[in-house]
Amino acid sequence: MKLLQVEGLTKHFPAGSGMWGKAGQVVRAVEDVSFNIAEGEVLGLVGESGSGKSTIGRLILRLIEPTAGKVLFKGQNVFDADKKQLRELRRQMQIVFQDPYGAFNPRMTVGNILGEALHLRGLASRNERDEESRHLLQMVQMPTTILGRYPHEFSGGQRQRIGIARSLAVKPSFIVADEAVSALDVSTQAEIINLLLDLQSQLNLTMLFISHDLSVVKVLCDRIAVLSKGKLVELANSEELFADPKEEYTRELLSAIPVPDPQLARR
């Protein structure tokens, strides 16, 4: 079953005037992109910096408005939703940001950060919210004793776990993970990827995983969509894309993956 359908998605930004552009010019960030994501599937969206990956993620959640195209979530066009409908859609569609610290209010404790999301879910009493917050922290493998602490007291990997817990608080069925591990060191990346795999399996989550790192995407994703200059150039199963990439741009991305062998690098 198709949970999400993206049809002809296009986004142009005005280039502005001045030294970088003339009035009336546009930056074609996303150009006529179409793909589907099945229920329970993890789709990887890859491409170099500036290719339009994060723009697509924000368009899907309607954090920005499109120039053209449709995004159908469970058959409903996200761009046609009124405020009430959009509020309900966003309970089902959540995002995990690259920099969780920047997405947190630094004056709010972990308990308040999670409690705010749980209040939107309809948990009114403080006891209910605290109990559910502890459950969410257990899900992301964080101690339940941190509810009174602040975001700056945690490492990047710990903050990302708290960010994932917040996104799960409203029980979404679809998550956009926007470069969710790119700001972390390699060992912490592996921990977060394993956590996402476990959560996806336990909760049957559908996910759009945005990354520029193909080695990460290979582990996590069922299919991979390759983006270049705002256009979708290739879409294939993960194993097929790595074994036999069809497009030259995809082959270039694959060839750029670092090889963990210093002798080979010297040759």
Image (cartoon, rainbow, N blue to C red):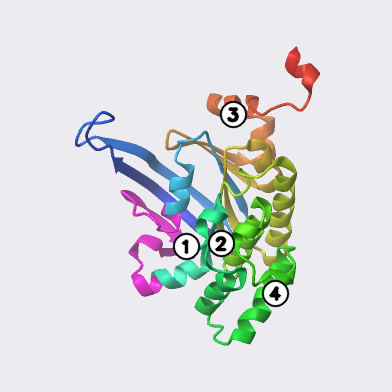
Q: Please, what is the three-letter code of the amino acid marked with disc 1? A: Phe
Q: Residue 134, which numbered label?
A: 4
Q: How many labels does the image show?
A: 4
Query: Is 136 in front, or is 150?
Result: 150
**Callout 1 touching callout 2 (CB < 8 Å):** yes
In whole angstroms, how far apart are the C-alphas of marks 1 and 2?
9 Å
Q: Going 62% across and 52% down the picture, which residue do you hit?
A: 42
Which of discs 3 and 1 lies nearer the camera? The answer is: 3
Residue 195 rendering spot, x and y as whole percentages: 72, 56
Rounded to the nearest angstrom, the CA distance separating label 1 from label 4 is 30 Å
Q: Which mark is residue 73?
A: 1
Q: Badge 3: few (under 14), some or many (20 or more) residues near its Cα, within 10 Å?
A: some
Estimate the x, y position of residue 182 in percent, counting from the top left.
61, 43
Q: Quadrant of the C terminus?
A: top right
In percent of width and height, residue 43 lies at 59, 49
Label 3 – label 1 distance at C-alpha: 30 Å
Precedes in sequence: disc 2 or disc 3: 2
Between the C-alphas of marks 2 and 3, the distance is 27 Å
Span highlighted in magenta in the image: 59-85
